[in-house]
Amino acid sequence: MRFIDKIYLVVFAFSVFTLSLWAAHTDSISFETTQPTTIGTTQLNPGNYELRAQEGQSELQVIHDGKVIATVPCQWTQLTNKAADSEVISSNNQVTGVQFAGRTESIQFNR
């Protein structure tokens, strides 16, 4: 293999690697709770949080003060239409789902 062919091979491999990183989409939403709330098996105290999920991953990160404080298992489900707004869905101080504006998938948590 000639030197120039090796360079093309390295450039191609690097391009494939960086393209896959660039293609991964991360969604996030700010979430404020005024009372103790559960998400998955994690108990959240009152405060401000960021909920972050990467497309294709089956976990949601809960971030408080810039630190990941929990990783919660989740599943993506198909919506009939794109979500108009980002929203944290909860019932009885239990987060049951998260949807992100413009997405046709939402996150659901096992109960």
Image: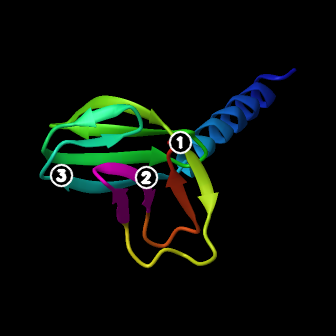
Residue 38 is a magenta residue:
no
C-alpha distance separating marks 3 and 2: 14 Å
- Residue range highlighted in magenta: 87-99
What residue appears at the point 63 percent right and 34 percent down from the top-left corner? 14
Indicate the position of residue 29 as horizontal and vertical percent values. Answer: 32, 57
Amino acid type shown at disc 3: Thr
**In terms of sequence position, does the residue under pointer 3 or pointer 2 come before the other?**
3
Reply above or below: 99 against 32: below
Q: Quadrant of residue 61?
A: top left
What residue appears at the point 76 percent right and 25 percent down from the top-left corner? 6
Amino acid type shown at disc 1: Asn
The residue carrying mark 3 is: 33
Q: Give the main secondary structure of the magenta stretch.
A: strand
The residue carrying mark 1 is: 110
C-alpha distance separating marks 2 and 1: 8 Å
Indicate the position of residue 77 as horizontal and vertical percent values. Answer: 62, 57
Indicate the position of residue 43 as horizontal and vertical percent values. Answer: 27, 34
The residue carrying mark 2 is: 96
C-alpha distance separating marks 3 and 1: 20 Å
Name the residue furthest front.
92
Left or right of 58 on screen, residue 26: left
Closer to the camera in the image, 25 or 85: 85
Label 3 crowd (10 A; few <14 / some 14-19 / many >=20): few
